[in-house]
Image (spheres, rainbow, N blue to C red):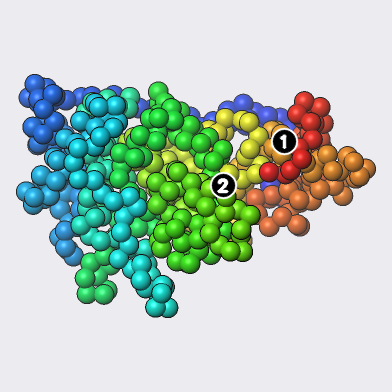
């Protein structure tokens, strides 16, 4: 992006935006496929699930449900102890009853939300604890998520089906496999279960959030877009450092932010941030926290998401669609608040690997410039965010030319902006019509009073 053929670049950029939403992998298998031997049990969830999971047609689903019951003992569902299988059956039964009762009155035991943190006292004694969970509570959280996934599949709470992931361990695994989303630390002599980025709670809260806010669409891609749009409108990057002290300030929890508290919103109790203490904000733990939040939220509707590295940061890979963000912070980047569909933020594999390399293999000196690149690229064509219009209006009021103006120097000039600008020049931006669109945006929307 440092040098461009201007004559061809303008046409290329407009051709690119015409197909701004990459073509995803289409679902071919619907939900609701129940083996003939089990169909008579649809009204008896406690009997249906064992029949369903033991049927040969569902071997990929049953084989992807896995948990470590002790170090080195991590079987899939068919090898689980009977007590563990029964716990899943019970969670499934109560989940179906809860949904049929209008998503109220969950009749059985439910994991605490947020979960208890066994290292909560470590901070008081000067230690820096990992945000661990008690193993029994972690397993309950896990089976509640599996129960929601299976109920959504069997009773068609979502249109797309788990069988569309047959033969792809990553797609099926990042929905059902507990070994991928929890890890176990036995260094202290006993097992604690570790999560990173966001702390899951009970899955019915997450599913109800999606259902009640009309975030479950007719396709996986549409659902991803709705959730990203919610994130764009609601999430705020938290204040402070990744430490128990700041976790508590932002989420009143000595661990990574509970998913339920990101959804509900919490005050920032840091005395130095008093103006933000009220009203609560939907704080998220930066790019790693947002990637984990998206993973847990979309898992509840059987859309697999894997947080991955990208240029020294973290971003979500929407595995079933093979799409990415250029940075986990993209949805609430000030440039992203420009009114275009949130799916425009998604990046194809070809572009993602060109920017970061396969498996994040490009040098940080190059890939770091592409962290958060997509909102910057989109801002050229959709420069109606408060961030840009505020600076444009200030430039106009102070008679600054394009080269000396705030629009260029605070957003696109790679000499001043450390990431994502990738070397846009004033001449190139003029060729692309950036300032013409800014003028039209000012005429239509007026000048914002704030850049946010």
Residue marked by disc 1:
383
Quadrant containing the C terminus is: top right
Vertical side of 87 occupied by 192: above or below: below
Residue 279 got which mark?
Answer: 2
The secondary element bearing badge 2 is classed as loop
Left or right placement of residue 364 versus residue 148 in this view: right
Vertical side of 269 occupied by 80: above or below: above
Percent x, y of residue 177: 25, 48
Left or right placement of residue 259 versus residue 5 in this view: left
Q: Residues within 10 Å of mark 2 (few under 14, many from 20)?
A: few
Residue 48 seen anywhere in this rendered image of the structure: yes
Residue pictured at 42% horizontal, 40% vertical: 318
Residue pictured at 39% horizontal, 41% vertical: 297
The secondary element bearing badge 1 is classed as loop
Q: Which quadrant of the figure has residue 88? A: top left
Q: Which quadrant of the figure has residue 159? A: top left
């Amino acid at each position: 992006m440092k040098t461009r053929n201007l004559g061809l670049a303008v046409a290329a950029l407009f051709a690119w935006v015409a197909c701004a939403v990459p073509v995803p992998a289409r679902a071919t298998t619907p939900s609701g496929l129940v083996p003939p031997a089990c169909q008579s049990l649809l009204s008896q969830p406690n009997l249906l699930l064992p029949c369903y999971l033991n049927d040969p047609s569902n071997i990929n689903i049953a084989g992807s449900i896995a948990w470590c019951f002790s170090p080195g003992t991590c079987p899939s569902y068919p090898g689980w102890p009977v007590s563990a299988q029964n716990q899943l059956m019970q969670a499934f039964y109560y989940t179906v009853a809860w949904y049929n009762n209008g998503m109220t009155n969950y009749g059985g035991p439910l994991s605490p939300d947020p979960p208890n943190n066994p290292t909560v006292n470590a901070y008081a004694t000067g230690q820096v604890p990992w945000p661990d969970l008690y193993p029994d509570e972690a397993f309950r959280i896990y089976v509640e998520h599996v129960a929601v996934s299976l109920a959504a599949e069997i009773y068609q709470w979502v249109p797309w089906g788990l069988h569309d992931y047959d033969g792809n361990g990553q797609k099926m695994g990042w929905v059902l496999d507990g070994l991928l989303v929890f890890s176990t630390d036995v260094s202290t002599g006993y097992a604690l279960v570790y999560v990173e980025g966001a702390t899951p709670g009970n899955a019915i809260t997450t599913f109800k959030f999606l259902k009640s806010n009309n975030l479950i669409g007719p396709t996986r891609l549409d659902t991803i877009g709705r959730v990203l749009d919610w994130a764009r409108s609601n999430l705020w990057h938290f204040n402070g450092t990744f430490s128990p002290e700041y976790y508590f300030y932002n989420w009143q929890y000595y661990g990574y932010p509970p998913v339920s508290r990101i959804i509900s919103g919490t005050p920032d109790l840091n005395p130095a941030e008093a103006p933000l203490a009220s009203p609560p904000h939907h704080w998220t733990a930066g790019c790693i926290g947002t990637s984990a939040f998206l993973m847990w939220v979309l898992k509840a509707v059987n859309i697999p998401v894997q947080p991955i590295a990208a240029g020294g940061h973290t971003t979500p890979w929407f595995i079933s669609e093979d799409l990415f963000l250029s940075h986990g912070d993209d949805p609430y980047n000030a440039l992203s608040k420009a009114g275009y569909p949130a799916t425009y933020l998604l990046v194809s594999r070809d572009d993602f690997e060109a920017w970061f390399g396969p498996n994040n293999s490009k040098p940080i000196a190059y890939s770091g410039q592409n962290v958060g690149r997509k909102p910057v690229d989109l801002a050229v064509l959709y420069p109606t965010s408060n961030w840009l219009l505020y600076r444009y209006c200030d430039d106009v009021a102070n008679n600054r030319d394009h080269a000396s103006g705030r629009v260029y120097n605070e957003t696109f000039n790679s000499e001043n902006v450390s990431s994502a600008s990738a070397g846009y020049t004033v001449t190139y931006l003029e060729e692309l019509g950036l300032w013409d669109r800014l003028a039209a945006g000012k005429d239509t929307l007026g000048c914002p009073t704030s850049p946010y």
